[in-house]
Amino acid sequence: MIYFLSDAHIGSRALNDRAAHQKQVCNLLLSLAADATEIYLLGDMFDYWYEYVWRKPQEYNLTLQTLRTLTDQGIAVHYFTGNHDLWTFGWLERQTGVILHRHSQIMQIGGKQCLLAHGDGVGPSDLLSRYPKHLRRKIRRFMFLRSVFHNPLLQRLYALVPPSLGDKFGYEWARRSRMKELANPVGYLGENKEALVLFAKEHEQKEHLDYYIFGHRHIELDLQLATGARVIILGDMFRQFTYACMNERGELSLQNIAEQTI
């Protein structure tokens, strides 16, 4: 079996019991190891991640040990960075043995052609023109912030900020994002407004794929396009506890382990 999950946001200050949440996610990963050949983590597994050279993220020890256990068993674990955990500079791969991906990838998985990405910054070429003016401003602000976060020089300069201050800022920024989402969740917008679906439709005009698999949006979606391609949005692993699995015939299905908030 091949598994896909994303958006655990481990360590989030918006959670009531961070240790219990981390343990639940790790227990799931270890249970998947019973029959997993590959596991794809599609971003934001950590709510905030920055690799300071002189300080290792002790809070995430259980997750790091779990990932190392999986890779030591010969399971290929692919880790796609998201918009909360992109500040990795090699330590995560060395510590856990995961295969890191910083950009979307088209890969043959289970005999199927799949495009995988976290999903932030993904949309059709005419994305802005599809939304009213007030939403365009929000999208532009997000894209500007994303460009700042992905700037290699600014990423390195952040290391000059003492960890006590950098972590405080990072966790608080992430907490506000989680609290805003929990208070006002944005559900599925429909085929003509959901950016990830629009992207898949546009891509299908150039190249047909079997699956488009995303995280980021924190909604659970399995949508078949007119071309036969399926758009999968994985949900999350902190509120919905959803993930996907693909069997030996390349058939993919969404799974749910619990309807709860920790």
Image: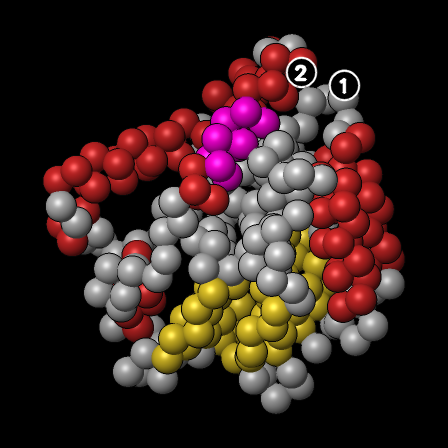
Distance between the alpha carbons at the discs numbered 2 and 1: 9 Å
Residue located beneath label 1 in the image? 54
| Viewer-side residue, 36 vs 209 | 36
- Judged from the image, the secondary structure of the residue bearing numbered disc 1 is loop
Q: Where residue 27 appears, x then y in whole percent?
A: 80, 58
40 on left or right of 98: left
Residue found 26% across the figure and 36% down from its top = 138
Q: Where residue 256 appears, x then y in whole percent?
A: 61, 69
> Bounds of the magenta span?
171-179
Please indicate, yes or no, whether residue 96 appears anywhere in the rendered image.
no
* Label 2 vs 1, first from the N-terminus: 1
Judge the density around disc 2: few (<14), some (14-19), many (≥20) Cα neighbours within 10 Å.
Answer: some
Residue found 52% across the figure and 45% down from its top = 82
Three-letter amino acid code at the position of disc 1: Trp
Would you say residue 177 sits in the magenta stretch? yes
Residue found 35% across the figure and 61% down from its top = 188
Please indicate, yes or no, whether residue 230 appears anywhere in the rendered image.
yes
Residue located beneath label 2 in the image? 163
